[in-house]
Image: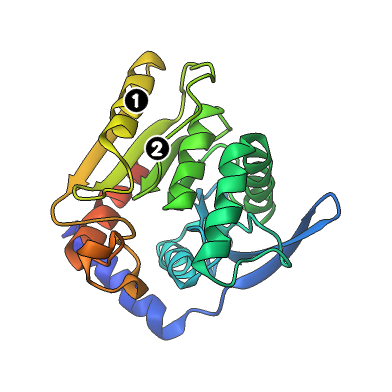
């Protein structure tokens, strides 16, 4: 019954919803431009979802998630981590830029926080926020939990889990959900074990769900279907992970 209701809501949305709203903001002199999804009716104290895109930056997948969340009555905001003039044009450029933010993690934190601020400005309840992220954005979602940003929970869809081993492990307050491809060889076993140990040491309320026959980018419809390439779409994992995300929202919020 619950899933039927969600499907009906999304079907209604696909016929009537307006486009996402472009929101320009800044980090010092750097111009940023994200996308806001605001429910048709102003809903007081309604929760908000911050969406952190994969390494290519704002893409169709992150926008689609914002649209689906808007259809369900949530405020959503797709973050611009790189900047309007810094977006990669190919995967080689994306790899370099994403690596920069992973190495200069405080700059990534700052861009995430700025996007959180924009989400609240759109009308989301600052006490009811969840961060989700895809691939590189999944790493960002985990970072939001590591830094105890003012969020109730974070969700990583096929995200990287690594961290500098020299960083101190703090108590982790937001709830954590990791949705992971069981065959994702881009995230080595050692990284998974280190992450799980970190969650234990940080006394986090965490969950990790594995999806069979799924590799990296399993929610991205444009990733093809060849698992041997390491990144591929998996319809079953995509649908199952979204349902897990919906259940997590009810608990976290």
| Residue under numbered circle 2 | 161
Quarter where residue 43 is shown = bottom right
Query: The C terminus is located in which quarter?
Result: top left
Residue at image point 26% right, 53% down:
241
Query: The N terminus is located in which quarter?
Result: bottom left
- Taking the image as shown, residue 16 lies to the left or right of residue 217, namely right
Q: Are marks 1 and 2 in contact (CB under 8 Å)?
A: yes
Residue at image point 43% right, 40% down:
154
Find the distance from the CA under tag 1 to the CA under tag 2. Answer: 9 Å
Classify mark 1: residues with Cα within 10 Å, few (<14), some (14-19) or many (20+): some
* Residue sitting nearer the eye, 246 or 215: 215
Classify mark 2: residues with Cα within 10 Å, few (<14), some (14-19) or many (20+): many
The furthest residue to the right: 29
The furthest residue to the bottom: 15
Question: Can you give x and y, in whole percent of width and height, for residue 206 in the image?
Answer: 32, 29
* Residue sitting nearer the eye, 128 or 93: 93
Question: Can you give x and y, in whole percent of width and height, for residue 21 in the image?
Answer: 63, 72
Helix, strand or loop for disc 1: helix
Q: Is residue 125 visible?
A: no
Question: Can you give x and y, in whole percent of width and height, for residue 229 in the image?
Answer: 28, 64
- Taking the image as shown, residue 50 lies to the left or right of residue 228, namely right
- Taking the image as shown, residue 110 lies to the left or right of residue 70, namely right
Helix, strand or loop for disc 2: loop
Q: Is residue 224 visible?
A: yes
Residue at image point 14% right, 56% down:
213
In the rendered structure, which disc, 1 or 2, sits on the residue that comes first in sequence? 2
| Residue under numbered circle 1 | 194
* Residue sitting nearer the eye, 243 or 169: 169
């Amino acid at each position: 019954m619950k899933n039927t209701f969600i499907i009906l809501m999304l079907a209604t949305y696909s016929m009537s919803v307006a486009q996402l709203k472009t929101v320009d903001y800044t980090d010092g002199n750097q111009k940023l431009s994200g996308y806001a999804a605001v429910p048709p009716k102003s809903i007081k104290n309604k929760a908000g979802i911050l969406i952190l895109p994969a390494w290519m930056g704002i893409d169709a997948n992150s926008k689609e998630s914002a649209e689906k969340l808007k259809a369900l009555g949530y405020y959503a905001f797709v973050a611009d981590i790189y900047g309007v003039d810094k977006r990669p044009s190919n995967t080689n450029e994306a790899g370099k830029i994403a690596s920069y933010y992973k190495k200069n993690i405080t700059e990534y934190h700052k861009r995430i926080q700025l996007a959180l601020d924009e989400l609240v400005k759109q009308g989301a309840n600052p006490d009811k926020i969840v961060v989700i992220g895809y691939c590189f954005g999944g790493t960002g979602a985990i970072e939001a939990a590591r830094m105890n940003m003012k969020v109730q929970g974070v969700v990583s869809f096929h995200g990287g889990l690594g961290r500098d081993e020299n960083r101190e492990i703090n108590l982790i307050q937001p709830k954590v959900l990791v949705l992971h491809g069981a065959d994702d060889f881009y995230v080595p076993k050692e990284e998974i074990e280190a992450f799980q140990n970190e969650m234990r040491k940080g006394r986090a309320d965490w969950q990790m769900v594995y999806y069979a026959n799924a590799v990296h980018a399993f929610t991205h419809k444009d990733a093809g279907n060849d698992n041997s390439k390491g990144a591929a779409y998996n319809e079953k994992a995509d649908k199952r992970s979204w349902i897990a995300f919906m259940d997590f929202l009810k608990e976290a919020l």
